[in-house]
Image (cartoon, rainbow, N blue to C red):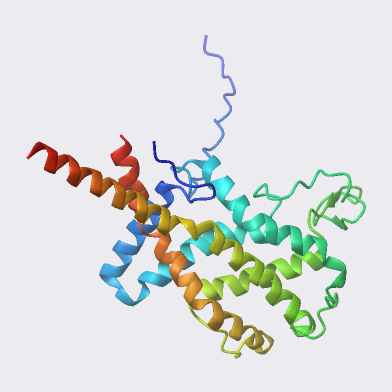
């Protein structure tokens, strides 16, 4: 019996991404790479990076980190109702920055500096890793695993 | 005799999820395999990041911590590569093996 290796994205995910790529390439051939990148990063990786507690990446009930977490008062709530932010502010800022960087990398568009001049210094990273991400996205839209599963019966 | 009775509305159905049709457990495992290391590393070094709390000058945090941000981003890219690096090889080898077996079977029947 053939089984995919650990950490392999599910074949249904591959099918969905391949389907999206095919449909988009019929109308916008130049966007077929970007649509897969935007789809998987914008809807899958980046939400988990920005909000790791809701994606189950970190355990926010851990008592070890409880003392480090900032207390925030929810808007329009009773003054005594205090929420515990699951991720410290400094870490959250870094996570948001990283997700912006990954989205730019996935869409293959460098920062132009018109809105955020400071992001220009992240462009060399995008240039350096463009090929890696392109290969990854091409791999995601190869449905060979589906064929292997079909042959397995 | 008719008696008016308050019948509560049923709760609205949950919004359809993008990943509803897929095996959520497998997707969750894949998400953890790729993102967890990055998040843990970010959480491990929050105190070294000089984030400007007042946000007086936009981009202060990027200017001060570009190297840290880029090294963290590289962690994720490396992880992304390692989760995929075996797959093309794995797929190609097994597909080749299956094709060879099929050809062998065809030649035997001939």
| Residue at the outermost left position | B110
In the rendered image, residue A39, in percent from the top left (x then y), is placed at: 47, 62
Q: Find residue B78 and report its image quarter.
A: bottom right
Query: Left of A30 or right of it: where is A128?
Result: right
> Is residue B15 depicted above or below B42 in this figure?
above
| Residue at the outermost top position | B1
- Count of number-bearing discs: 0
Query: Which residue is at the front of the view, A124 or A83?
Result: A124
> Is residue A153 depicted above or below B15 in this figure?
above
- The structure residue drawn at horizontal position 13% and vertical position 39%, both measured from the top left corner, is B108
In the rendered image, residue A106, in percent from the top left (x then y), is placed at: 50, 71
In the rendered image, residue A45, in percent from the top left (x then y), is placed at: 57, 59
| Residue at the outermost front position | B108
**In the rendered view of the protein, which quadrant contains the C terminus of chain B?**
top left
Q: Find residue B42 and report its image quarter.
A: bottom right
Query: Left of A71 or right of it: where is B75?
Result: left
In the rendered image, residue B31, in percent from the top left (x then y), is placed at: 58, 52
- The structure residue drawn at horizontal position 77% and vertical position 79%, both measured from the top left corner, is B65
- The structure residue drawn at horizontal position 61% and vertical position 74%, both measured from the top left corner, is A101
Query: Left of A123 or right of it: where is A108?
Result: left
């Amino acid at each position: 019996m053939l089984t995919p290796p650990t950490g392999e994205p599910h074949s249904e995910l591959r099918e969905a991404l391949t389907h999206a790529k095919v449909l988009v390439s019929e109308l916008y051939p130049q966007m077929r790479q970007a649509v897969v990148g935007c789809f998987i990063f914008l809807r899958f990786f980046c939400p988990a990076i920005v909000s790791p507690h809701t994606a189950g990446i970190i355990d926010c009930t851990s008592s070890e980190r409880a003392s480090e977490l900032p207390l925030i008062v929810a808007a329009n709530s009773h003054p005594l109702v205090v929420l515990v932010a699951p991720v410290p502010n400094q870490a959250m800022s870094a996570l948001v920055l990283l997700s912006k960087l990954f989205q730019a990398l996935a869409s293959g568009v460098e920062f132009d500096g018109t809105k955020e001049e400071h992001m220009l210094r992240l462009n060399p990273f995008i240039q350096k890793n463009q090929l890696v991400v392109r290969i990854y996205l091409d791999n995601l839209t190869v449905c060979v695993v589906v064929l292997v599963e079909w042959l397995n019966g | 005799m008719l008696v008016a009775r308050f019948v509560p509305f049923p709760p609205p159905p949950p919004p359809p999820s993008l990943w509803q049709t897929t095996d959520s457990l497998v997707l969750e495992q894949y998400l953890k395999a790729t993102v967890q290391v990055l998040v843990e590393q970010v959480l491990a070094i929050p105190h070294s990041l000089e984030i400007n709390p007042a946000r007086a000058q936009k981009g202060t945090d990027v200017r001060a911590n570009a190297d840290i941000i880029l090294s963290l981003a590289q962690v994720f890219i490396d992880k992304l590569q390692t989760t995929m690096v075996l797959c093309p090889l794995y797929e190609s080898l097994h597909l080749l093996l299956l094709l060879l077996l099929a050809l062998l079977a065809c030649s035997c029947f001939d």
